Amino acid sequence: MKTYKKQKNIVRRTREDIIEVASHLFSEYTYLGASMSDIAKKLNITKAALYYHFKSKAEIYKKVLDRIFSELKSSIAEASSERTIDKKLYRLIKNYLDFGLKEKNLIRALMLKLSPGSPEINKHIMHLRENIVNLIQPLVREVILNKKITGESDSYLITSLLAGMMDGLLLEYSFLNKKIDSEKVSNQIVSILF
Amino acid sequence: MKTYKKQKNIVRRTREDIIEVASHLFSEYTYLGASMSDIAKKLNITKAALYYHFKSKAEIYKKVLDRIFSELKSSIAEASSERTIDKKLYRLIKNYLDFGLKEKNLIRALMLKLSPGSPEINKHIMHLRENIVNLIQPLVREVILNKKITGESDSYLITSLLAGMMDGLLLEYSFLNKKIDSEKVSNQIVSILF
DNA sequence: CATAGTTTACCTATCGGTAAGTAAGTAAAT
DNA sequence: ATTTACTTACTTACCGATAGGTAAACTATG
């Protein structure tokens, strides 16, 4: 039996480093705009080394998206821990906005289907995107039920509006390089929506 | 002996044709995702012919964006012709949504800074984008003044929210390939916002 | 015949990706 | 303790394909 131990004293985190660096480059220049060479150069390794750790560019990209998604997910989950529904909603919005501001560019890929090219990647994004909507919708439904919103409203549309509003806002502000006061804006959205 | 394509009675509008075709390809595959060869192939001409009409890929792209922008602009302008403020707002939203649905993908480039690469193009988009906000904001301000919206609201934020909501919605629906009932949604937005 | 419009043929740069080689470490057998 | 077998984590050097772009020859038409 041959059990090879992992190397001890050296902290091996090349894979994570690659994802980290790739994350920045993809978010800045999009999937097609950032090349494997670019990523390698920024890491001071060769392109071939990337292919030692990942089997393709698409695989790196998917891992990048997965990382962003899981961060966003826990950020949204945090909101559910609030006690009152109003607070939940407020926290959801604020966390979402804060997250989007931090990850300025990459969230676009996740939200906005910015990956041309392989259907494989599109499918992956589609899947993540659905997950996000599913995270938000229950909370919105809860709010609607609680507030007894007027007839026409359905939770799907409201969720779309809410998500759209947040995404759009983030884009607007990141586009113009404006600062955003997430607390103020969150409050405004809450008061506007319900 | 080479036989070149017949081109006698046909109307020569190659430049417009190029912009038309490029528009579709850019919107479907983004700037980086659509190549000059792709454009040429779809037009049944050669790549070199493109360079007879345009000096670079970037120039074609800018012209494409300009065309989209002017269409959007007149679509927004239409709203101002309505008599009551409520109607204006409704028309603004509906026209914007309808336009966005028609030009599904390209509006993204205009709205969402999807062009990596040359700063030249980014600058161009920035400029168009500002113009659009400037078109919308006066109407929103008018509505706010008229409705005497509650204290905290300022027209810039509301405009951002509105634009964001519309862009976000369009993306959401185009992403999921859902049909959108622009009348219903427009009404919902109006009633939610004000 | 002049010229607008197009094609052919080609350029260089870069793309994603791969084959082969290797220094350095690890684990087990001698 | 040394050797042997093997792994890890790379590098070098290259591949075919394609990118944007250009020079020059060609063709159709007014």
Image (cartoon, coloured by chain):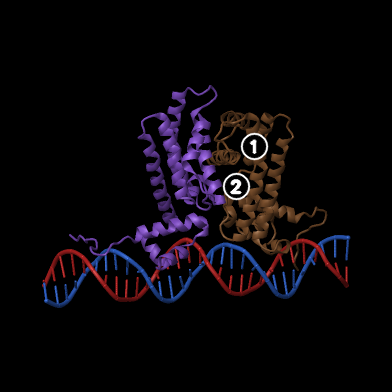
Chain colours: A purple, B brown, C red, D blue
Q: Is residue A159 visible?
A: no
**Image point 44% across, 46% down: which residue?**
A99
Q: Amino acid at mark 2?
A: Met
Asked if residue A141 is positioned above or below residue A102 in the image, the reply reads above
Q: How many marks?
A: 2
Q: Amino acid at mark 1?
A: Arg
Asked if residue C16 is positioned above or below residue B110 in the image, the reply reads below
Q: Position of residue B42 (x, y in %)?
A: 66, 54
Q: Nearer the viewer, residue B39 or A99?
A: A99
The answer as to whether the residues below labels 2 and 1 share one chain is yes
The residue to which callout 2 is attached is B111
Q: Nearer the viewer, mark 2 or mark 1?
A: 1
> In the shown orientation, is residue A169 left or right of residue D10?
right
> In the shown orientation, is residue B80 left or right of residue B27?
right
Asked if residue A140 is positioned above or below residue C9 in the image, the reply reads above
Marks 2 and 1, the one that precedes in the sequence: 2
Residues at circles 2 and 1 in contact by the CB criterion of under 8 Å: no
Residue B141 tag number: 1
**Image point 48% across, 35% down: which residue?**
A187
Asked if residue D11 is positioned above or below residue A157 in the image, the reply reads below
Q: Nearer the viewer, residue B16 or B47?
A: B16
What SS does tag 1 mark? helix
Quadrant of image for the C terminus of chain B:
top right
Q: CA distance from mark 2 to mark 1?
A: 21 Å
